[in-house]
Amino acid sequence: MRRGAAYHTPFFIAFSFYAKVNKDSAFAGGVVCSKKVCSSAIGRNKIRRLLFDCLRSKLSVYPANLRLILVAKQAMNKANYGQVCAGFDQAISKILVA
């Protein structure tokens, strides 16, 4: 079994790995959006909010020991919510199967 994996979508890269399980384990997720993706802080924050919203929409699906990091790509500038969530659903389905 691989320790961690990366899943590429047109809008972001999802890095996932599983932490050791203990009684206080909870899902942890993060979003990264660099200045290369969008030069303005307002644009980067909009992208982060969009990705965090996709993360929050599936909270009941994640196992407690899953750690997930989403790294935005340049295409996020022109993406809408439906496109991003569709890519996110595909990535999550691959992550949960692996």
Image (cartoon, grey):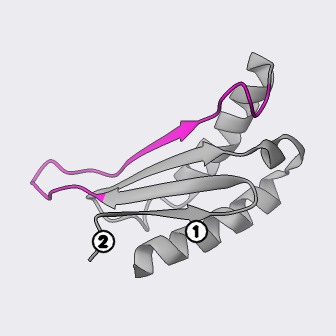
Q: Residue at x 70, y 27 (%)?
A: 45
What are the residue bounds of the magenta stretch?
A: 18-38
Left or right: where does residue 49 sit relative to residue 63? right
Where does the N terminus fall, quadrant-wise? bottom left
Q: Which mark is residue 91?
A: 1
- Tell which residue pokes out farthest to the right in this image: 78
Label 1: how many residues lie within 10 Å, few (<14), some (14-19) or many (20+)? some
Vertical placement of residue 82 versus 55, above or below: below
Q: Pinpoint residue 34: horizontal percent, then vertical percent.
A: 66, 29
Left or right: where does residue 62 sit relative to residue 9? left
Q: Pinpoint residue 79: horizontal percent, then vertical percent.
A: 85, 50
Q: Residue at x 53, y 68 (%)?
A: 92
What is the quadrant of residue 71 in the picture?
Answer: top right
Query: Observer-nearest residue: 24 or 45?
Result: 45
Q: Pinpoint residue 67: horizontal percent, then vertical percent.
A: 36, 52
Q: What residue type is labelled 1?
A: Ala
Q: Which mark is residue 2?
A: 2
User: SS at mark 2?
Assistant: loop
Q: Are marks 1 and 2 in contact (CB under 8 Å)?
A: no
Main secondary structure type of the part rendered in magenta: loop
Left or right: where does residue 19 sit relative to residue 41? left
